Image (cartoon, rainbow, N blue to C red):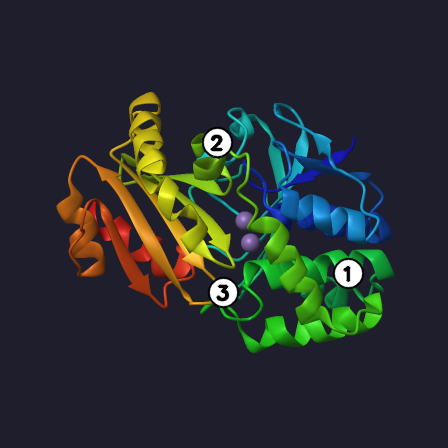
Amino acid sequence: MSVYVFGHRNPDSDSIVGAISISYLKNQVENEEYIPARQGDISAETEFILDKFDGKLPMLKTSVAGEKVFIVDSTDKIHFQDDIDEATILGIADHHKLGDLTTDTPLEAWIRPIGCSNTVVYEMYKSYGVEIPKNIAGMMMMAILSDTVIFKSPTCTKVDTKAVKELAEIAGVEDYKKLAMEMFIVKSAVDGASARDLNTRDYKEFNMNGTKVGVGQLEMVDITVLEPREEELLEDMRKMKEENGLHTVLILLTDIMKEGSKLLVVSDDESKIEAAFNTKLQDHKVWLDKVLSRKKQVIPFVQPQF
Ligand code: MN
Ligand code: MN
């Protein structure tokens, strides 16, 4: 029986590359066939990575009842297929807070508070003594550079920078920072994108003690290009809130050069968000200096408000 490997809904590069890198590793060391999968469409950023390093698009897998699975880049039930409870989870590789998924059988869990799931996978390769193929090394390197915002994110550790350097060597990439900037420029493209496209480009919902909160993030090299569209984004956030029965929708417009985020807020109670960040909103917006990471600088402060 095959094992499907996939990351969270609305997959980012870490989820897609993680499915590929874990599957390859497992196929070297186990008898069962591991198959890279995904829960949705890939982003322009991920497409850039797959193109550059000759990566194959993982298969779409939106139902997993009765299947064996290995999950990457989240352990929150809300981020997986509706029938994930009916799958057998063989393993996890992740770098987020521990979520609410449970299992009936023993599993392997590789979870570390570092910058990227692919850094965790890199350590798995080391631990198994499996050589990383050149193209997979390139993709893993790009996933780490994406998740750590080229090492600028507070989630980035020495383990991540060391992994990138070694992976760059295997992949034969000399100037990995330059290649990462190219990737972020691709990621920053907003022309022709609807407000909903932008709000959901990297969007996750969280169950905060029974209250649903949606948090999206756009990482860009210059967020001022979105200034004329902020009202339109807020208007669409109000729609998302209604459609999905959310208490709050937050969108982070993250400027990777200025190293901070403009937070857009639509909420039943804005005072909770003001309290979370110890700030005052103006017209449903506020600039949060140095805030680059949703998992480390946003969720841990918003969650206690609920
Ligand atoms: Mn992710
Ligand atoms: Mn990740």
* Label 2 packing within 10 angstroms: few (<14), some (14-19), many (20+): few
Question: Ligand 1 within 8 A of label 2's CB?
Answer: no
Label 2 sits on residue: 194
Helix, strand or loop under label 1: helix
Tag nearer the camera, 2 or 1: 2
**Which badge, 2 or 3, is on the more N-terminal residue?**
3
Mark 2 in CB contact with mark 3 (< 8 angstroms): no
Task: Give residue 59's position: percent from left, percent from top.
Answer: 74, 31
Check the image and report above or below for 198 versus 263: above
Work out which residue is located at the far front of the displayed protein and give it.
Answer: 228
Label 1 sits on residue: 138
Residue 246 visible in this rendered orientation of the protein = yes
Location of the C terminus (image quadrant)? top left
**Which badge, 2 or 1, is on the more N-terminal residue?**
1
Task: Give residue 177's position: percent from left, percent from top.
Answer: 66, 70
In the figure, is residue 58 to the left or right of 105? Answer: right
> How far is mark 2 from mark 3, CA to CA?
34 Å
> How far is mark 1 from mark 3, CA to CA?
22 Å
Residue drawn where x is 55% and y is 50% of the image? 188
Residue drawn where x is 49% and y is 65% of the image? 113
Check the image and report above or below for 263 versus 142: above
